[in-house]
Image (tube, rainbow, N blue to C red):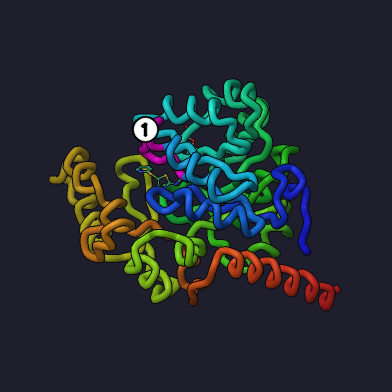
Amino acid sequence: MLKTKLCELLDIEHPILQGGMAWVADAHLAAAVSNAGGLGIIAAMNANGAQLRQQIHLAKEMTNKPFGVNVMLMSPYVEEAAAVICEEKIPVVTTGAGNPTRFMAAWKEAGCKVIPVVPSAALAKMVERRGAAAVIAEGGESGGHIGELNTMALVPQVCDAVSIPVIAAGGIADGRGLAAALMLGACGVQMGTRFIVADECTAHDNFKEKIIAAKDIDTIVTGKRLGHPCRALKNDFSRKFAEMEYDMSVSNEELEQYGVGALRRAVVDGDLQGGSFLCGECAGLVKERMSCRQIIEDVVNGAQRALGGASQWL
Ligand code: TUI
């Protein structure tokens, strides 16, 4: 048992959220995480309103526990997704890749708890003023789109800046990470990479095997030149992207074009050469496949061991 105020706030058993990963975080994964006592999250990513609603209905068939929806604020369908969330009365909305303040009043009105991902203390303060229920302080160890700061420095500074609960993300894949996050002042964690290899995750087997085989130095950040740095596993695609990024004869448009469809190719097709396998630095900690229930149990038990053992230094 490891209870924090986040469990009460979100009506969950364990203080663990599953990240809203594009193409990965579908109704199956979200329902499995929620059924295991965490908070499962469906990624709205670039889905239109109808596609998102279908995933929400599917998840409602698979669990009667609360689950959330993540809104990627750069999506061309962000307005549609925002409206569907209100209509479907989703209990928790997380946001990423931008400032969510223009949607917050409507979501709150519909009874949703809004939990934005924040890369800085300043944005944390701003969303707190607009009524956020909590924030996710996500460090640059994360997979996908990342901010400037890393988890160790970001989490305590966000904790100092706001009085709402703070959830830590970025680089967390086991019980030691959860214990450390609690010591930094967070009241829970969000994990992405660890859940990609979950039995219930529908991502392509090649993606799961690539994570299991990954070492500590096997991720790379690309996209800084375009203003949206993204961390992914090293492969032909990400190395070529990095090369093109440093080649000033390649225009930004060509660079953007090179990335189109790469997330789908990774997650759905398992295209080891041409896909973009978004993944956090903690991939090297992920060694075996398990069910969502086993993952959550392992993280909670590991955190209890770490926290219990800490008294030896006092
Ligand atoms: O959003 C993520 N991770 C993602 S989104 C994504 S899809 C994508 N594709 C192409 C370009 C960009 C994204 C893949 N992975 N994580 C949450 C996150 N949010 N990380 C960083 C941020 C963030 C950054 C800036 C949140 C707010 C923010 O605010 C800037 C502002 O406008 O104030």
Q: Tell whether 218 sits left or right of 290.
A: left
Residue 161 percent location from the top left of the image:
70, 39
Rendered position, 98 above or below 83: below
Residue ID at (25%, 66%): 272
Residue ID at (80%, 73%): 308
Q: Where is the C terminus found, in terms of image quarters?
A: bottom right
> Which secondary structure, mark 1?
loop
Residue 125 appears in view: no
Rendered position, 258 above or below 53: below
Disc 1 beta carbon < 8 A from ligand 1? Answer: no
Residue ID at (48%, 44%): 58
Residue 270 appears in view: yes
Residue 18 percent location from the top left of the image:
55, 53
Q: Which residue is mark 1?
A: 48
Residue at the extreme right of the image, as rendered: 314
Image mark count: 1
Rendered position, 236 above or below 125: below
Q: Tell whether 257 sits left or right of 9.
A: left
Residue at the extreme front of the image, as rendered: 61
Q: Tell whether 81 sits left or right of 1.
A: left
Crowd around label 1: few <14 · some 14–19 · many ≥20 (10 Å): some
Q: If the picture is divided into quarters, which one holds ligand 1?
A: top left
Residue ID at (72%, 46%): 11
Q: Which residues are magenta?
A: 43-51
Q: Where is the N terminus found, in terms of image quarters?
A: bottom right
264 in magenta: no
**Residue kind at label 1, given as amino acid type:** Asn
Residue 176 percent location from the top left of the image:
65, 69
Residue 137 percent location from the top left of the image:
59, 47
